[in-house]
Image (spheres, rainbow, N blue to C red):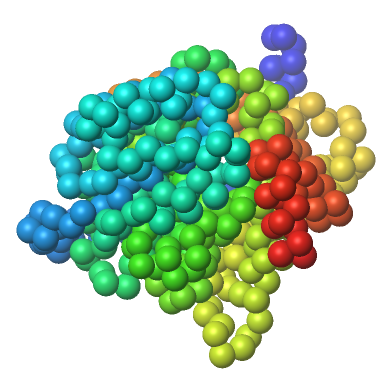
Amino acid sequence: MIDFWQRFFDFWLNVPPERIVRLFWYFFLLEVPRYLLFDLVVVVLFSLKRLWNSDTYQAANNQLFAEKPLITIIVPGKNEGRHIPKLVQSLTEQTYQNFQLIIVDDGSDDNTPIICRKLEKEGKIDLFLRNEERGGKASAANLALRFAKGKYIVHLDADTSFDRDAIEKILIPFYTDSEIGAVGGNVKVRNSKEAVIAGFQAVEYLQTITMGRMVASYLGIYKIVSGAFGAFRRDLVERVGGWDIGPGLDGDITVKIRKMGYRIVFEPRAVSLTNVPTSLKKLSNQRFRWSRSMVRFRLRKHADIFVPDQNFQFRNFFSSVENLFYNVVLDALWFYYVIRLAINNPDIIFLMIVMKMFLYGMSNFVQVILVSLMSERGRQEIKLLMYIPFMSIYDGYYLRLVRTIAYFREWLASSSYDDVWNPRKSSVQAKEHHL
């Protein structure tokens, strides 16, 4: 081991800087400018803007509580009985209390109906609905929408919990700009200590959600309001016909509202916590589902975003192009880069892998430090630095491979329509409608 590190340092300390850039051009030319330098500048600008507009924010907060509109919280799900009591308890502790809570059981075979009917009798759930036969998450959400009375819809996942002011915080942006159609909440990982793979996801969520969506929101290209915690104007949700059959239903409804000309923003101060998969199999299945929606919705269903007609909006166009370029095009380019690197430099390939881990580790380290300094949980999140040395393996190899497989499967075989995440009949209906 000592001999290896001596060889490693002897080699890289004697390599001219220009050769290091040539060897790692993918990192220096594509990823550092976009995911480190650019993001750091925008996050600083975002924070300064928030400080500058603090009076406007406080005025919006005051207006929210002066009006105190009824909102509807909808929670669709299947076999979520063990999570419902904690969710309800979390909502009873919120600083904003004028809400109608609707929980929809989508054909559960656990004790969800017993638990929810008991909570409904106790007055802790305003309305409990049940699909005797599973129809899918979109079907359950649309059923709740039919009974919604609130001015705003807050969509939650049952296994999510919230900071005490989360509902209040996610509503405030609506009172800062009448053109805001939806607000995304900040989703962080609750069970990061349960497994190593959960720890990696905790770092990933800080980078891609807390920081990534902050940047996208500032640029006006924020493209997905998470179903785990998101708020919508009810009139707009009704105008677009509610949620379409997924996977990818969260990004789909966000794009539909964007195409109507409304702004979508991210509110990092509205914080929720969720459990993430603790096994590679469950995580892979989740990411296959998420990644397939990139092709299914962005390239197929919403292809009209790329057409320069009278409804063309540059921000929507740029939002989709940026998303597709950095997630699809560059994934393909990365495989070409790695294969060529291995062919041309077989004698130093292991030294390059270790150097790559070091470079990406430094980049990830800076990002996590910055997010932790801005976070309400900074002391907890700074401990996630222990995962940084191996994040390049998790994100750069494992997740990239999963995404690429998902893209090919969806592009060649429309595999999302065979996903057991949705009932077979719903997927058949969606396929006939979309293709």
Across and down, in percent, residue 25 comes to: 71, 51
Task: Say if 372 sits above or below 239 in the image.
Answer: above
Across and down, in percent, residue 26 comes to: 70, 50
Q: Residue at x 11, y 60 (%)?
A: 67
Q: Determine which quarter of the picture holds residue 69.
A: bottom left
Image quarter where the N terminus lies is: top right
Asked whether residue 354 is in view, the answer is yes
Across and down, in percent, residue 201 comes to: 53, 30
Classify residue 62 as left or right of residue 29: left
Task: Say if 333 sits above or below 356 in the image.
Answer: below
- Check the image and name the residue furthest to the top: 1
Across and down, in percent, residue 18 comes to: 70, 50
Classify residue 184 as left or right of residue 101: right
Classify residue 366 as left or right of residue 327: left
Image quarter where the C terminus lies is: bottom right
Q: Determine which quarter of the picture holds residue 62.
A: bottom left
Task: Say if 272 sits above or below 22 in the image.
Answer: above
User: Across the whole image, how many numbered discs are drawn on residues?
Assistant: 0
Q: Nearer the viewer, residue 433 or 351?
A: 433
Q: Residue at x 29, y 35 (%)?
A: 125
Q: Residue at x 27, y 72 (%)?
A: 178
Q: Residue at x 75, y 58 (%)?
A: 431
Q: Nearer the viewer, residue 208 or 148?
A: 148
